[in-house]
Image: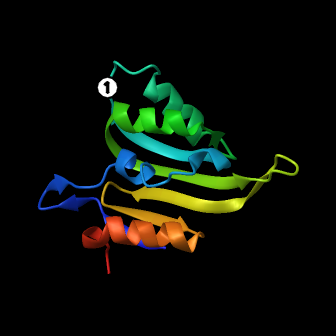
Amino acid sequence: MIMLNQWESGNKVITLKEILAQITDYSSYNWYLFWLDAMGTWDCDFDYLVLEDKVNNSLDGILFPFDELLNLGNCLEQILSIHICACRINPTNGYSEPYEICIELIDTSYWEIEIKNDQLLEKFRSVFARYIRE
């Protein structure tokens, strides 16, 4: 797991969209949104307050397509907290395997990213090296 500062000298430095952009094989995962607390714009294709309520009242998270996660990252002006996990799709039976990627923003201050794939984890370490919390 790595922890990344979201802010540097009072400026936001890492967005959800920038984190998701590092995951190139996203289509081989089922993506689940478990928690959302955010402020958004009203020019989005969805009502983020309704989405927030639906997600936060779900016991098992909401299956959420990756492209809609990217759209969410574009529409939300400020994410206070978010928890997303992805599990690989088993090609044999179509069911999800245990979670391989979990991305969580904690109280607008730092990202916790847990990745079981060592190559992808190293990519994150390289891309976001200067923001890693020790």
Does residue 30 appear anywhere in the picture? no
Q: What secondary structure is marked by label 1?
A: loop
What residue is pinned by disc 1?
Answer: 41
> 120 and 130: which one is in front?
120
Most extreme residue toward the bottom is 134
121 or 73: nearer the viewer: 121
Image point 59% across, 54% down: which residue?
85
- Given residues 33 and 129, the one toward you in this image is 129
Residue 90 at x, y percent in the picture? 79, 53
Q: Residue at x 68, y 46 (%)?
A: 59
> In terms of image quadrants, where is residue 5?
bottom left
- Label 1 sits on what residue type? Thr
Q: Residue furthest left?
A: 9
Q: Is residue 48 above or below residue 124?
A: above
Up the image or down, 13 lies above or below 35; here it is below
71 to the left or right of 65: left
The residue located at (61%, 39%) in the rendering is 57
